[in-house]
Image: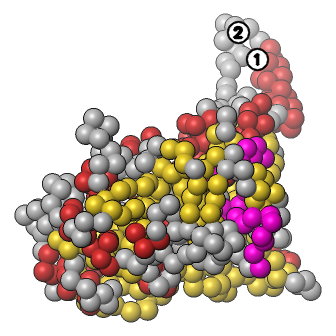
Amino acid sequence: MTEPSRIRNFSIIAHIDHGKSTLADRLLEATGTISAREMQSQVMDSMELERERGITIKAKAVRMHYKAADGRDYLLNLIDTPGHVDFSYEVSRALAATEGALLVVDATQGVEAQTLANATLAQALSLKLVPIINKVDLPAADAEGVSGQIADILKIEDTPIAISAKQGLGTEEVLEAIIRDIPAPVGDAQKPLAALIFDSSFSVYRGVILLVRVTDGILAAGLKLRFFSTGHEVVVEEVGYLTPKMTPAKQLCAGEVGYVICGIKDIHQVRVGDTLMESARPLSAPLPGYKEAKPVVFAGLFPVNPADYPELAAALEKLNLEDSSFSYQPESSQALGFGYRLGFLGLLHMDIVKERLEREFDLSLIATSPNVVYRIHEHGQEWKTIDNPAKFPEHGDIAAIEEPYVLATIVLPVSHQEGVLNLLKERRGEHVSIEYVAANRMLIRYYLPLCEMVVDFYDRLKSVSKGYASLDYTDAGMRPSDMVRLEILIHGDPVDALSAIVHRAKAYDMGRLMCAKLKELIHRQNFEVAIQARIDGRIIARETISAKRKDVLAKCYGGDITRKRKLLSKQKEGKKRAKQFGAVELPQEAFLAVLRLNNDKK
């Protein structure tokens, strides 16, 4: 059993692409956790999607042994965290299981918006931050200037450690700083068991695998455990730690991090963030430190083949165990059939979840246009929340509408401020403050409607700033707004999957563009097809697809005109009947193209 005084539990937090995963690789190498033969770049990012995109999506845990300069052996538990703003929930879960964090800042980029957000989150949990300046070997590095930013913006007075994670420079100094600066866990192996579940996964053969941080007590095979929130009882089959492979052990003691297998086959019995305790010695209160994930973007996911609906249901259950930050519930659409309505933490989160469902479970899916949650007050009724355009009331019933706002923090070079400020103005932004944090860098704070951010704001921001601006945002409550439901009618029938909730000032342009795009994509019929955009019961835009025309006079080489008139009249009656009873089939590319159109123009 390792003494708690020789254990260090820590995370690495940083803005995206500041070298967090590379530093984790060097720590694994320096401690001998990974052999040279097994070593590869981004070794902690085991998911194929993470390696492709070069980002960390899920929190990971790994155990390392290190002999410090004082001659003593220490046990280091690293919990890796994502860097993108959409995965801040993953960061909060990882930080709640640690006593400190390495704060990595790029020497060429300086303090970015997500650096500030993650540092603030860690400071709110009273964690010890060890500042590190990475990439000091690059020609454009400005270690001295970045050190000043860390002190001025983040209010961290400790002298940063200068390293190059790619070259391995400064790795030993980082390990010594972990031992010296990050506090040891405070726990007692004699107390009743208290273990925090900070992540989980599902194995077809082993069932649910829980990743836990043991705060007090001892966790060993054969123990009868109880989940604090659900009261469900299980018996421990196996415990162990990750190196990063699963390695069985006799027990996990106070202060240690590892995995637990209890043979749980029903994933609904597990809640990430819950507290594990002994059935014989129950706790009076759960362990603190977790915030509830609050989805801000909602979209429908439907299988391309309706027969795949049961497979989609099973896939969502299993994926939700690994990523509990998205919510889902059944939904049906006249155009797309049966599917699910999902809530996400952001648009990248939505994109990642959809791609994981398609890759890991071999599904083909269609996603509807993303929406946020609105509060609507109908005449004579209570306020209610709407996350789906199909639930939007008739315009005459609405007394007031509120939409969610966020406080956006953007860090950028001064040379790109004009393009960024114009973008914020275009997205109905409200100025809060502008600060100059260095000679050539500025920090902008704006209130923005969330619906203007979730679609393509991040991409547009990177475009107008040539990739140099960084973004973070926090909830700023609800505000009154003039929102309307934009409906698309095909041949007189509304298509619910193409409906969207938009601001009235942008509804006309959006409707016109959607109608024009659908005209290009819908195949011509034997009858004339009208494509219309409607708000508040009024048509605001229209496109017409002309009917196919068969030359019924081709076989008439001459003769009486009455014969030709008879053929044309018969054709006219047929077209009229087809128009009355015919149905227009929308191709899948129409839904995908309109979704992309919304992304480009919203």
In the visual, does 116 lie left or right of 585? Answer: left
Q: Residue at x 73, y 44 (%)?
A: 263
Image coords of residue 495 (percent x, y): 75, 50
User: Three-letter amino acid code at disc 1?
Assistant: Lys
Residue nearer the viewer, 428 or 549:
428
Mark 1 or mark 2: name the one nearer the start of the chain.
Answer: 2
The magenta span reads: 259-284
In the visual, does 186 lie left or right of 555? Answer: left
Q: Residue at x 22, y 58 (%)?
A: 165
Q: Residue at x 58, y 66 (%)?
A: 214
Dividing the picture into quarters, in which one does residue 80 lie? bottom left
Image coords of residue 302 (percent x, y): 70, 43
The disc label shown at residue 224, or none: none
Residue nearer the viewer, 457 or 266:
266
Q: Callout 1: few (<14), some (14-19), or many (20+) C-alpha neighbours within 10 Å?
A: some
Residue nearer the viewer, 247 or 174:
247
User: Which residue, given by chain and number where applicable, does mark 2 sit on?
Assistant: 556
At numbered mark 1, what does the secondary structure look like: helix, strand or loop?
helix
Residue 245 among magenta residues: no
User: Three-letter amino acid code at disc 2?
Assistant: Cys
The disc label shown at residue 564, or none: 1
Is 491 placed above or below 66 here?
above
Task: Tell whether label 2 touches label 1 (CB within 8 Å).
Answer: yes
In the visual, does 227 lie left or right of 167? Answer: right
At numbered mark 2, what does the secondary structure look like: helix, strand or loop?
loop
Residue 279 among magenta residues: yes
Marks 1/2: CA distance? 7 Å
Q: Is residue 346 visible?
A: no
Main SS class of the magenta portion in the image: loop
